[in-house]
């Protein structure tokens, strides 16, 4: 039996990879304009980092992590998200002491053992953005604006920004108590998962998607009605600045997100073009996380974009040209000059291919055509004969796009081709 990719993982094939390159290039270019620099962290970390960082009662930690014992019996986990690892790296390298504007981004694979379906994978990729050390609502608005600017740069037009505040350690505990009280009364009518959440993590009930539970959930107390004054003011200022920047949003008091580290602002961008897994990106503020993981009392805020979902929305665009010149050493003795020319053209920045199998002229022409080669460079008996007579090597250069042919001196080939490509 042939071996197949593991369920929930997928290959990104050469024909698809252009879209990935485009969004990654857009990320690098745009984030640099906002002062973000790339940080690369390992794909596996000590399990404790995620248990403490994301929260032991979250679905991610309790059900979805790829955790394994190393040979020394320490427990390791493939990262289910990027934030916890980035926070660990910030603390470990004291980045807040050396970087006066600590803004970083990361791009890479994440792993969650979720039930696979369209847009949901067990290995997926994120572009993740984090800013540290800013408590002002101005950074919340800037980070949200950056998230949308990134989608703009990728050509994603159909999208909705959803915004909420989940309060902080001053106001949330009292709200959660109220919520739990209300939930205990409703519990018998809720789904099994929610009945469990009433006791383990009542906020998660607000995330429930089970249709029969929705009417009951709508009657629950709302966090935004129970924010303390500083959280209320912070949220009002974030919204004011988004309005100032002309960014439309929808409020949802049920946007609590699947990770426990959030305080105050949370946000998500969804797209109706995505189907059931409609969330393109999600993020929020996590002011206590750096301290909880053993670092200083440093504020943090960020978001992560799901790349599989983003790439599926990106217009396909022009494919990158595969081949500028296809070399055809046809005569006996033509291979050596072709190998030298190939090296020279590639060094000049051209995309060059040669059929090393030495097939018939007809099949080589077909191949050049299929590869979308702009030029075929032919060295046959005629061209070699001229060389013997004149001392200068000439090639027949066929412009496949214009169906014209020229005899070109080897030393002039680069100039000739570049002139046509740019002309
Ligand atoms: P998250 O909402 O868990 O947040 O994930 C962010 C995005 O990753 C989602 O909106 C979705 O596009 C994508 N995603 C998540 N799970 C899957 C999956 N199984 N298959 C495909 N795509 C998926 C976080 O991960 C936070 N760390 C974001 C953040 C950064 N908050 C603050 N800083």
Image (tube, rainbow, N blue to C red):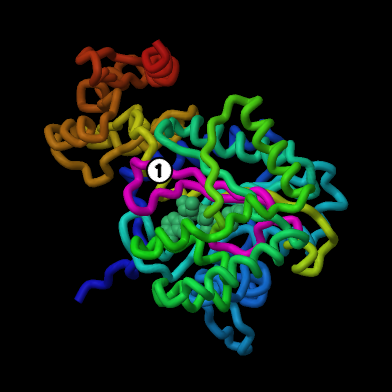
Q: Helix, strand, or loop for circle 1?
A: helix
Residue 256 found in image quarter: bottom right
91 and 275: which one is in front?
275
* Residue at the farthest right position: 97
Residue 338 in the figure: left or right of residue 42: left
- 79, above or below 225, in the image: below
The residue at the point 23 percent across, 32 percent down is 368
Identify the residue position indicated by label 1 in the image.
311
Is residue 268 on the magenta stretch? Answer: yes
Locate the C terminus and report the quarter of the image it occupies.
top left
- 289, above or below 160, in the image: below
Is residue 304 on the magenta stretch? Answer: no
Residue 188 at x, y percent in the picture = 43, 77
308 and 338: which one is in front?
308
Residue 41 in the figure: left or right of residue 289: left
Residue 56 at x, y percent in the picture = 60, 75
Give, as a single range, the part of the protein colored magenta: 258-287
Res 124 visible: no
């Amino acid at each position: 039996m042939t071996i197949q990719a593991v369920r929930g993982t997928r290959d990104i094939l050469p024909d698809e990879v252009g879209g990935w390159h485009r969004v990654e290039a857009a990320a690098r270019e745009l984030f640099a304009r906002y002062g973000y620099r790339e940080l690369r962290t390992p794909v596996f970390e000590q399990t404790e980092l995620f248990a403490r960082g994301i929260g032991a009662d979250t679905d991610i930690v309790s059900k979805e992590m790829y955790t394994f014992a190393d040979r020394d019996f320490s427990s390791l986990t493939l990262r289910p998200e990027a934030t916890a690892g980035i926070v660990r790296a910030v603390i470990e390298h004291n980045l807040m002491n050396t970087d006066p504007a600590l803004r970083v981004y990361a791009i890479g694979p994440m792993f969650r053992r979720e039930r696979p379906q369209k847009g949901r994978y067990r290995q997926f990729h994120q572009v993740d953005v984090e800013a540290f050390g800013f408590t002002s609502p101005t950074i919340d608005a800037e980070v949200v604006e950056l998230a949308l600017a990134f989608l703009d740069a990728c050509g994603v037009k159909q999208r909705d920004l959803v915004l909420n505040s989940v309060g902080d350690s001053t106001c949330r505990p009292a709200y959660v108590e109220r919520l739990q009280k209300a939930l205990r009364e409703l519990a018998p009518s809720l789904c099994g998962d929610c009945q469990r959440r009433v006791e383990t993590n009542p906020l998660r009930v607000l995330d429930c998607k089970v249709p029969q539970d929705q009417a009951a959930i709508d009657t629950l107390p709302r966090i935004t009605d129970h924010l303390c004054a500083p959280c209320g003011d912070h949220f009002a200022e974030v919204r004011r600045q988004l309005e100032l920047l002309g960014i439309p949003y929808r409020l949802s008091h049920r946007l609590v997100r699947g990770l426990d580290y959030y305080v105050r602002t949370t946000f998500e961008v969804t797209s109706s073009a995505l189907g059931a897994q409609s969330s393109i990106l999600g993020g929020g503020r996590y002011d206590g996380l750096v301290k909880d993981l053993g670092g200083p009392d440093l504020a943090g805020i960020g978001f992560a974009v799901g790349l599989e979902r983003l790439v599926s929305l990106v217009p396909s665009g022009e494919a990158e040209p595969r081949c500028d010149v296809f070399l055809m050493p046809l005569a006996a003795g033509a291979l050596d000059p072709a190998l030298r020319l190939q090296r020279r053209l590639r060094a000049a920045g051209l995309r060059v291919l040669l059929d090393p199998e030495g097939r018939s002229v007809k099949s080589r022409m077909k191949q050049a055509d299929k590869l979308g080669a702009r030029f075929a460079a032919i060295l046959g008996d005629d061209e070699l004969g001229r060389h013997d007579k004149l001392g200068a090597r000439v090639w027949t250069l066929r412009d496949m796009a214009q169906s014209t042919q020229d005899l070109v001196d080897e030393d002039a080939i680069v100039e000739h081709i570049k002139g046509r490509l740019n002309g």
